[in-house]
Image (spheres, grey):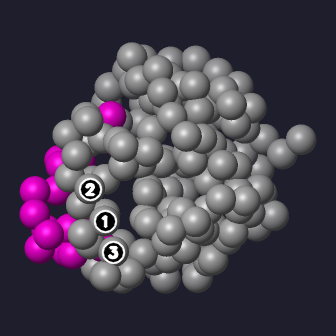
Amino acid sequence: MSLELPTERLLIREWELGDADAALQIYGAEEVAHWLTPEWQPVTDISAMRSVLHAWIEAGPNLIPPAGRWAIVRKEDGQLVGGLSLKLLPPFEEDFELTWALRPDVWGQGYATEASQAIISWAFKQGIEEVFAVARPRNERAIAVARRLGMEWVGETEKYYDMRLQVFRLRPS
């Protein structure tokens, strides 16, 4: 599903292979990869990042709507600052999980919250009934974003990625 979604400061758009250099600054950063799902390893070079982006781009049309993976671009200077995804949570693939990852040098500027609010609003218009976010218990930044998004804490579980995670949920108001 093709998407181009503007916010006040950002543009959420489809990934492109030309984004590999900027994406490597996000998904190659150890301080980002540390908080991602357990199977994720930091991307180590530009060739590997192109392969990841190629896989995401190719998989896009086969995802169950409104699932997808998108780049977050700062309007002011056109810099790619992060990525978002809306995907089905394992193992049952019934619940939609919102994820975000930003370049470490732009942390703390509200981009994760702003982009996530836009994707959540768009996803609810597509008819999904709730969105989840999961975070490792010590990932204070992710937990703070979930709370700023108005998500309610629903508990702790090891259900999704075979590790203890905090679970947050948001339903349309």
Residue placed at 19% from the left, 74% from the top?
A: 51
Q: How far apart in space, not on screen, are marks 1 and 3 (Cα)?
A: 6 Å
In this picture, is 165 found above or below 23? above
Where residue 22 is drawn, which disc sits there?
1
Query: Mark 2 or mark 3, which has the lower sequence index?
Result: 3
What is the secondary structure assignment of the residue under circle 1? helix
Magenta-highlighted residues: 35-53
Q: Position of residue 5 (x, y in %)?
A: 67, 71
In the picture, measured across the screen, residue 132 lies left or right of residue 14, that is right
Where residue 76 is drawn, which disc sits there?
none
Q: Mark 3 points at which residue?
A: 19
Q: Dot 2, how many residues are within 10 Å of its Cα: few (below 14), some (14-19), or many (20+)?
A: many
Q: Mark 2 points at which residue?
A: 25
In this picture, is 86 found above or below 60? above
Residue flagged by tag 3: what amino acid is it? Asp
In this picture, is 107 found above or below 3? above
